[in-house]
Amino acid sequence: MPLSILDLVSISDGSTASEAIAASMESARHADQLGYHRLWFAEHHNTPNLAASATALLISQAASVTERIRVGSGGVMLPNHAPLMVAEQYGTLANMHGNRIDLGLGRAPGTDMMTAKALSRSSAEPQAFAQNIYDMQGWFGENGTAHSVPIVSAVSAGTEVPIWVLGSTVNGASIAGQLGLPFSVASHFAPDQLDDAIQVYRNAFTTDAPTAQIDEPYVMAGINVMVADTDEEAQRQFTVVEQMFLDIQTGKRRKIQPPVDPETLAGQGVRDHPMLRIKAVGAPQTVKARMEEFVERTGADELITVTYAYDPAVRDRSLQLLAKTWF
């Protein structure tokens, strides 16, 4: 099964966005060499601990330092952007880096509503979202012409950049199925409707839609992963993520904190945090077993892993151990 990576370019306490981006690019090189299938960058705004805001720029840099791995967005929050601009950005990426570019699209703002307004947020209604995808496929097509308006994009024409729909609910799943597109489910932070969403997607899937680009349903599911030499060390490193979600819960705006003794977080409810139920944390064989259980549960065609670490070297070590065990 293909194994991929979602990178949010986390900024550790005492570090800068510049250093976080440099560490992310170094991890991209490792992922390329280790055999991972995709590397996607998420879009987030108004967050002190994440430097993944301008996904197209990150993708271009990552593609320039790698040779094989597919690089894309996980995803572009489409209501924050003009569809034509997205098509031209990703068409340009395809022209620069060849057939290694993916375009994952979501309907969420990727931020709070105040910041979404500052981004000139447009409609996120399902019909508008679907129409935007239809137009973008036209701009990526042979003639580079939108389906609803006679606008030609020379830079995106003929690139045929593959489009994914991202979602965490049955609504997003239904849209992906009805459009005949692959579906990436955000189970790594929104697992509540995971099983229902996958079922709805498969039931709704059709190849009759003008947007359809695959012959059968294809699901990529997100999972939090931390691999270390021992279960105990992995649990300690995973407290980085647990502290981050505690900060979200309590309203603290901090950069990524160093790991702590897991016992110091006992009683704060983070070990059973509902947003962190989908995880594989431990030594290599422990993680492999958890991931195999997740695949059996979901029937996913591909997994996309999310790994936060205070020390970039810890993240790279986790990627290495997982690759050695999985591939």
Image (tube, rainbow, N blue to C red):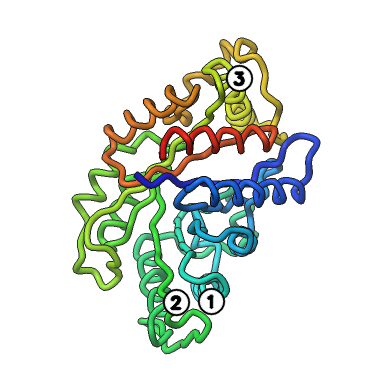
**Where 182 sits versus 10, above or below?**
below
**Where 107 sits versus 321, above or below?**
below
Q: Are marks 2 and 1 in contact (CB under 8 Å)?
A: yes
Residue labelled with disc 1: 95
Could you tell whether 214 is left or right of 125 in the image?
left
Please state which amino acid type lies under the numbered disc 2: Thr
Residue appearing at x 25%, y 60% in the figure: 178
Element assignment for label 2: loop
The quarter in which the C terminus is drawn is top left
Residue 12, by quadrant, is top right
The quarter in which the N terminus is drawn is top left
Q: Are marks 1 and 3 in contact (CB under 8 Å)?
A: no
Q: Position of residue 29 (x, y in %)?
A: 61, 51
Residue labelled with disc 2: 159
Residue 221, by quadrant, is top left
Please state which amino acid type lies under the numbered disc 3: Arg
Q: Are marks 2 and 3 in contact (CB under 8 Å)?
A: no
The answer for how far apart the CA atoms under marks 2 and 3 are is 45 Å
Q: Residues within 10 Å of mark 3 (few under 14, many from 20)?
A: many
Residue appearing at x 45%, y 28% in the figure: 280
The answer for how far apart the CA atoms under marks 1 and 3 are is 43 Å
Residue labelled with disc 3: 236
Which comes sooner in the sequence, label 1 or label 3? 1
Which comes sooner in the sequence, label 2 or label 3? 2
Residue extending furthest toward the right: 14
Depth check, front residue: 245 or 67: 67
Please state which amino acid type lies under the numbered disc 1: Asn
Element assignment for label 1: helix
